[in-house]
Image (tube, helix red, strand yellow):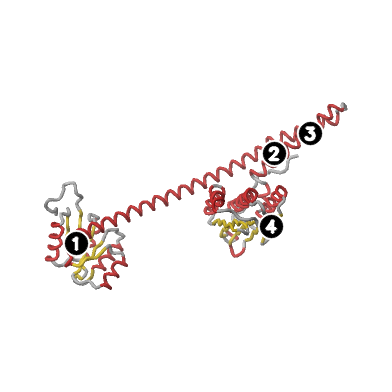
Amino acid sequence: MTGPGAATEQRVVRILHLEDSRVDHALVKFALQRSQLANEITLVDTLEDFRRELQQGRHDIVLADYHLPGFTGIEAWEVARELKIQIPFVVLSGAIGETAAVDAMHRGVSDYLLKDSMHRLAHVVQRALEVSETRRAKARADAELAESRQRLGELAEHLQTSIERERADIAREIHDDIGGALAAVKLDLSWVSRRASDPEVQRHLNSAMDMLQHALGASQRIMMNLRPPILDQGLVAAVQWLASGFERRTGLRVNVRRSAERIEVSRDVQLVAYRTAQEALTNIGKHAQGASQVDIDLSDGEGVLTLEVSDNGPGMSTGALRKTQSFGLLGLRERAAKVGGWLDVSSSPRGTSVILSVPLPRAAEVPAPKEAHDQGDFV
């Protein structure tokens, strides 16, 4: 029913009124008319009719008496919850106790109103509708945010997978094409060198051989960084190789502790752990000025793969830590999540630690490694 004098553009509020007293129903209609709240009100007095009307989904709000023949307004609210219908629910009562009112609010009822305060009914209805709409908007925003995060995670995973695939392809091309060509040139130069007697020619040949050897070394180094063949020998060997290379380049002492000489993990987990160690060492080289030692702990105890890379440097400021996490470690966090793990980064004046944890399946669930493409040393 539309109240007199209501603006034609005002939204009509569709009300489901659960009430066994026709007098009280008339009072509700009169209070709404006086407030000029445009409305359509439907009266029901049994749980069966209440359930049927709810399932039709035509109503914006429920006004329910608290004391009804054989049931209460709270039981009606439980019916709405069982049906998973999100609708504002206001309890009207002639004498609801404080305990009952508090219990109703704790159960999720939108509001309650004493029948002798009926002049406030329109205000209570409008407030319940506004709160409900705000909650629905928040739920929609949360759902959209969750979907956005999921899609970003899937994009990050796709990008990381594509990057690893391209790295492997480029490493193969370097090994098969560039490495093979450089090795052939080296053999030809060696053949020429053995037959050349002119000292000047020999000097140029030796210089060319030095440059060629440098190119071979650079090709090997690039290939190893793109997709190290050492990964085919297992995670422990790969981490030890990373540590040795870092120690040679920086002069920092690197201690590698492992729970076993060989730790069997899936290919995906192995790659995540390797890239985590690589990124952590790279960050230490960039940010840990003053560090003298790096510790790498690798274990698979209690069904969890744990990789911790820590240094004894002065630690990083909050700003530096945030910058460090923005791309490299943030990408590793996404990759860790995709294999069911997580990444923690902590920093203090005693140093910085990067910890990767990945729950491991039972041994029978670990897939057998695929046949690896040969990327042996160049000639």
Nearest to the observer: residue 190 or residue 66: 66
Q: Report how many numbered discs are placed on residues in the image.
A: 4
For the C terminus, the image quarter is top right
Which of 270 and 135 lies nearest the eye of the viewer? 135
Q: Earlier in the sequence, mark 1 or mark 2?
A: 1
Q: Nearer the viewer, residue 71 or 91?
A: 91
Q: Is residue 263 above or below residue 202?
A: below
Q: CA separation, marks 3 and 2?
A: 15 Å
> Which quarter of the figure is the N terminus placed in?
bottom left
**Badge 4 or badge 3: first in the primary sequence:** 3
Q: At which x and y percent is residue 331?
A: 54, 49
**What is the three-letter code of the residue carrying label 2?**
Ser
**Residue 128 in the figure: left or right of residue 327:** left
Could you tell which of marks 4 and 1 lies nearer the N-terminus?
1
Q: Residue 209 — which label?
A: 3
In terms of sequence position, does the residue under pointer 2 or pointer 4 come before the other? 2
Q: Nearer the viewer, mark 4 or mark 1?
A: 1
Q: Amino acid at mark 4?
A: Val
**Residue 36: x, y in percent?**
15, 54
Q: CA distance from mark 2 to mark 4?
A: 27 Å
Q: Which residue is mark 2?
A: 219
Q: Could you tell me the amino acid type at mark 3?
A: Met
**Amino acid at dot 1:** Arg
Residue drawn at (73%, 49%), measured in percent from left and top?
Answer: 248
Q: CA distance from mark 4 to mark 1?
A: 72 Å
Q: Is residue 36 above or below residue 195?
A: below
Q: Which mark is residue 256?
A: 4
Residue 240 in the image: state x and y as whole percent: 69, 53
Q: Which residue is mark 1?
A: 120
Proximity of marks 4 and 1: CB atoms separated by less than 8 Å:
no
